[in-house]
Image (spheres, rainbow, N blue to C red):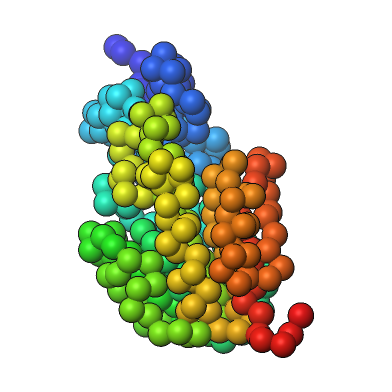
Amino acid sequence: MTDSITLVKTWTNAQQRLKAARVDSPAIDARLLLEAATGASRTDILTDPYRVVTEDQTRLMDEYLTQREKRVPVARILGRKGFWKLLLNLTPAVLVPRPETECLVDMILKRTEENQSFTVADLGVGSGAILLSILAERPAAKGLGTDISEDALAVARDNAASLGLGGRAAFLRTSWASGLDDESFDFVASNPPYIRSDVIPTLDPEVKDHDPILALDGGESGLDAYEELIPQVYRILKPQGGAWLEIGYDQAEAVETLMKQAGFSDVVTFKDLSDMPRIVVGTKKTLGKS
């Protein structure tokens, strides 16, 4: 008689496989895949570790692990990713949302009140992570997400609908803010592509092989998107409106300069939880005001 296959045994074996494949976070990834394969929660794994895993669940777990060993990201295997307080659906057309981008969401929420009515634009909306996280926390706010990719917009629309936010979120296919009215938004956020073209081949397989190049490649300098984007952000902001732009770790000075050249005041760079420069903030001042 063979021993039963349990949650804890499956988790342990999965970690060993992922460690052997040199996956960065084997314990976390093994747990996420185990939860998806078995329907168990994190609490179940800790409090009921000897629950038996069925043959079908074991087979599905093996399929997941085989993909992860090939460096397919967990979010791509499962087709979803947790971001802020949301669970977002993903396709190959959109970037997997990163934890550091949550800093941008947090900063905008701290700038606003729970019942405040305002408009926000998310330029290069991708999966909708930034825009939908803000709207979910601010029930009187409305927002617009733009993207040059119709496939990405389809993902964002699907996420908005499934989260019950479709009535307050609109989506438009365009390049950044092209075609949007002047002075029409209180806040603008963007996480544009900022990786230098020559760096992309050196990235981890999880990124270079699975994230859309359109969402990664910032050109030879890494700044191509900002040079095009920042003047448009300034144009569509209302007076006293705020801009939040995510940047690469070594781009603070260059992006701050572009912001100031476009007319922004109070330009400051904030660090993420890893103490890396991450978000550049600026305000569109009214003429005659300091």
Q: Is residue 119 above or below residue 255?
A: below
Q: Nearer the viewer, residue 227 or 65?
A: 227
Q: Position of residue 131 (x, y in %)?
A: 46, 68
Q: Is residue 69 left or right of residue 257?
A: left
Residue at 36%, 58% in the rendered image: 126
Residue at 50%, 85% in the rendered image: 183
Q: Position of residue 267 (x, y in %)?
A: 68, 63
On-image quarter of the C terminus: bottom right
Say if residue 15 shows up in the picture: yes
On-image quarter of the N terminus: top left
Q: Position of residue 51 (x, y in %)?
A: 42, 32
Q: Nearer the viewer, residue 246 or 171?
A: 246
Q: Is residue 111 above or below residue 102?
A: below
Q: Nearer the viewer, residue 174 or 30?
A: 174
**Residue at far front of view:** 261
**Image-quadrant location for residue 165:** bottom left
Residue at 45%, 63% in the rendered image: 229
